[in-house]
Amino acid sequence: MRQIDYQQQQILQINLQDMCEDLNPSCNYKHCRSFFQISFQEMKWNKSHLSFLPTLFNIEEDVVYLGKKQQIKRRAYKLLDQYLFYKNKNEKIVWINYENAIIELITNPELGMGIRLTKCFDKIEFFGNVNNWYKFMKRFAVQYDFSHYYIIIAKLNKIKFGELFKGKNKLDGSEYIIKIYQKSLIIDDEDRQQFFKEISVIRQLKTDLTLKFYDLFENQDQIYVIVENLPSHSLLDYVSKNPFFSEDKAAKAIFRIIKIVAYLHSKKIMHRDIKLENFIFRQLDNLDSLCLIDFKLAEFYDDEGHYQFKRCGTVGYVAPEVLADNNYDLKVDIYSVGILLFILFTGKEPFDGNYQEKLIQNLIGFIDFHDLRVSNLASDFLKGLLRLDPQERLSSHQALNHKWFQREKLIGALKQQIKSTLQNLNKPYKVKASFKKSFPILQSNSIPHLQDPLSFRMKTLPNPQSNERVHLPVIQRRTTHQIPSNSILYGRIK
C-alpha cells in the first residue's frame, strides 16, 4: 500500500490519539461535530437515483477498507466533487455526499495511511493512495489542522464576522488570502445559512474565470477560508479612468464577462450581484484576464424559486423582476451585464438620482437608448440583454453567439491581417484602404461622469419586527452587531 509522501507526513505528524472528531463541542446538538453540520444530514451509502449521470471522475482507484467483522475488503471507488461512488454486486451505483464532513488522515498498522470522513453520527474510513484522494476531497470537506499547512503573514482589514489576512502555504510557499471568521459572531440563522451557501457555491468553481477557492479549516472558535490572492484593481477603477470604450474594446470586455456568467450558469449558479467592482483584473488592465469575485449573494437555481432570500442585488444593476418579487431565473445576471455594457458605451448609469429614485427607476426598468452612438448590431445586442420580459431576454449562450461578437472577431482578424501584411511586405502603401479603417472612439459633447453605484444589498427577511418599516421603497438597514462600513448591510423590503 502506497504511503503518504515524507514531507507531508513530517508536517502532519499524524497519530490516532490526536484525531479531532468534534470541532463544535459547545453546540447544543449532539450530532453537530462541525459548525457546518448544524443541519442534520446523514452520510449513508445511497442507492437512490441521482439527478445527473457522471461519466468523468476526479479519481477512479481501488481502495481497501475494514468490513463489519474487521476483515480487509477491496472496492473500486470513484470520486466526483462531493460525491463518492462504487458499484455493488448487482452493478448498481451506490453513492454518498460527503460535503462538510470532517476529513482526517489516519493510520492502520496493517493498511498504512488512510482517510476518515465524519459527518454527524456517520463515519467512513478507507485506505489507499492517500495523497491523491486527500488532494481532491479536502475541497468539499472540513479540515482542522490549519497551522500544519499555513502561516499568517499580515493582517489586511476587517470583514463581516471576522478579519482578512495574507498568508503563506508551508508546502508550496505560495501566498493566499485567509478569511478568519469568529463562529461566535455568526449567530443569526439567516446569516449562517447564507455563509453556508457561499461556501457551497465557491467550492464548485474551478476556473480562472472566477476567484479560486482552496481550503476550509475549522477549530473550536474559528473558521478559516483560503482563497487566491488577487490584485485589487477592479473594472470600476479601470472604467473610472477610461470612460470611453470603442465598440471593439467594449465587445472584448463584455465577451469575457458573459463567458464568466455562462460558466456559472452551466453549473446552475446565479451570481445576483454582477457589477463593475466585482470584476478584478488578474493582469493589470488586461480585459482578457477579468475574473468575478464576491459570491455572498450567489444561489443555485431552483425551478420553484425556493431561495433563502429572493430580493437581493445592487440598486441600479438588479433585474426588475427581482425587485417586483416575481419568480426569476438565471437571466437576472444577463440584465446586470446589460447595465454594465450600457455604462461602457455611455460612461454613465441608466438610472440616476438618490437611492429611492434609483430604486423606483430600476423597478420600472425603462432605459433611454436614444443617446447611444453605436452600431445597429451593438444596439440590438444591448437591448437583447436589457429586455424587461425575461422570456425575451438573451440567455448567456445566446449572448455568446450574438452577431455583434462575430463582427468584432472579424474586425480583429482584419487588424491582424494588416499587421501581418505590413510586417511581411514592409510596404504600407500596398495595403488596401479598406483594411486601414478602424472603429472611432464613441463621440460625446462632454466627458461623462461615472457615478459610484450604490452597493447596498437588499434582502427580504422573515418575521419583521413591529418597530421596523416594511413599505417600498423605504429600506431600514439593520445589523446584528457592529461591522465595518464597507461590509454587506441588510435591509428589509416588502
Image (spheres, rainbow, N blue to C red):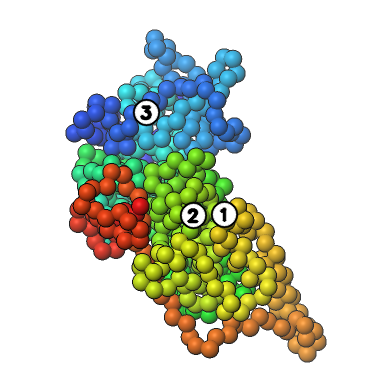
Name the image quarter holding residue 410. bottom right
Measured in 3D between alpha carbons, the distance from the residue under mark 3 to the one under mark 2, in whole angstroms, is 34 Å
- Disc 1 marks a residue whose amino acid type is Pro
Distance CA(mark 2)–CA(mark 1)? 8 Å
Image-quadrant location for residue 69: top left
- On screen, residue 385 above or below 37: below
Instruction: Say whether marks 3 and 2 touch (CB < 8 Å).
Output: no
Q: Is residue 186 above or below residue 336?
A: above
| Horizontal and vertical percent position of residue 450 | 44, 77
- Residues packed near mark 3 inside 10 Å, few (<14), some (14 to 19) or many (20 plus): some
> Which one is in front, 255 or 348?
348
Residue drawn at point x = 24 percent, y = 34 percent: 24
Who comes first in sequence, dot 3 or dot 2?
Answer: 3
Residue denoted by label 2 = 321
**Is the residue 337 above or below the residue 347 in the image?**
above
Q: CA distance from mark 1 to mark 3?
A: 36 Å
Q: Are marks 2 and 1 in contact (CB under 8 Å)?
A: yes
Q: Which residue carries the number 1 mark? A: 390
* Residue 410 in view, yes or no: yes
Q: Is residue 342 left or right of residue 490?
A: right
> Which percent across, then down, holds residue 493?
34, 54
